[in-house]
Image (cartoon, rainbow, N blue to C red):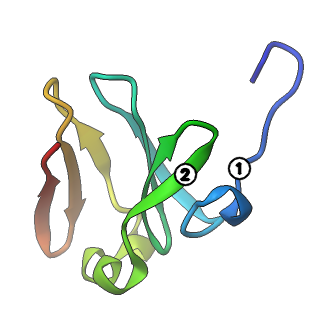
Amino acid sequence: FDGRLFRRFTTVDGLADNWVTHLAEDASGQLWVSTNRGLCRRVGNAFETVVPARSWLRFRPNMGTPLTTDTEGNVYLGSEHGLFAIRK
C-alpha cells in the first residue's frame, strides 16, 4: 500500500501459489509468505520460493501452517508433524 493503491502479488510475481496462509517479517525486515504450495520470501519487488511444493507437503499447508520468526531472522513453521526451522 503506497497510501493510495493496494498492490496484489501473485504467482506472476514469484509466489509459489496465490493461496496465502500466513505472513511474517523477520528482524531484518524480510517478508516471509506461507502459501498452499511453498514458503516464499520477498526479494526486491518479486518473491523467491524457499521451500518448494514437493518438500512443502510434509508441512500440511492446507491446515494453515503457522509462521513466525525470531530476533536472529530464523523462520519457524508449525504443523501436525512438529516444528520446522529454517536458519538464516
* Element carrying mark 1: loop
Identify the disc placed on residue 9.
Answer: 1
Task: Identify the residue position indicated by label 2 in the image.
Answer: 47
The answer to whether residue 69 is left or right of residue 21 is left
The answer to whether residue 13 is left or right of residue 42 is right
Characterize the local packing of mark 1: few (<14), some (14-19) or many (20 or more) Cα atoms within 10 angstroms.
few
**Front position in the image: 48 or 16:** 48
Residue in view at x 16 percent, y 23 percent: 71
The answer to whether residue 8 is left or right of residue 50 is right
**Front position in the image: 64 or 27:** 27
Q: Nearer the viewer, mark 2 or mark 1?
A: 2
Q: Where residue 64 sits in the image (x, y, percent)? A: 41, 63
The answer to whether residue 50 is left or right of residue 48 is left
Q: Is residue 54 above or below residue 79?
A: below
Residue in view at x 19 percent, y 73 percent: 80
Quarter holding residue 31: top left
Q: How many marks?
A: 2
Q: Where residue 68 sits in the image (x, y, percent)? A: 27, 41
Characterize the local packing of mark 2: few (<14), some (14-19) or many (20 or more) Cα atoms within 10 angstroms.
many
Q: Which residue type does callout 1 highlight? A: Phe
Residue in view at x 65 percent, y 65 percent: 18
* Element carrying mark 2: strand
The mark nearer the N terminus, 2 or 1, is 1
Quarter holding residue 40: bottom left
Q: Where residue 61 sits in the image (x, y, percent)? A: 39, 71
Quarter holding residue 73: top left
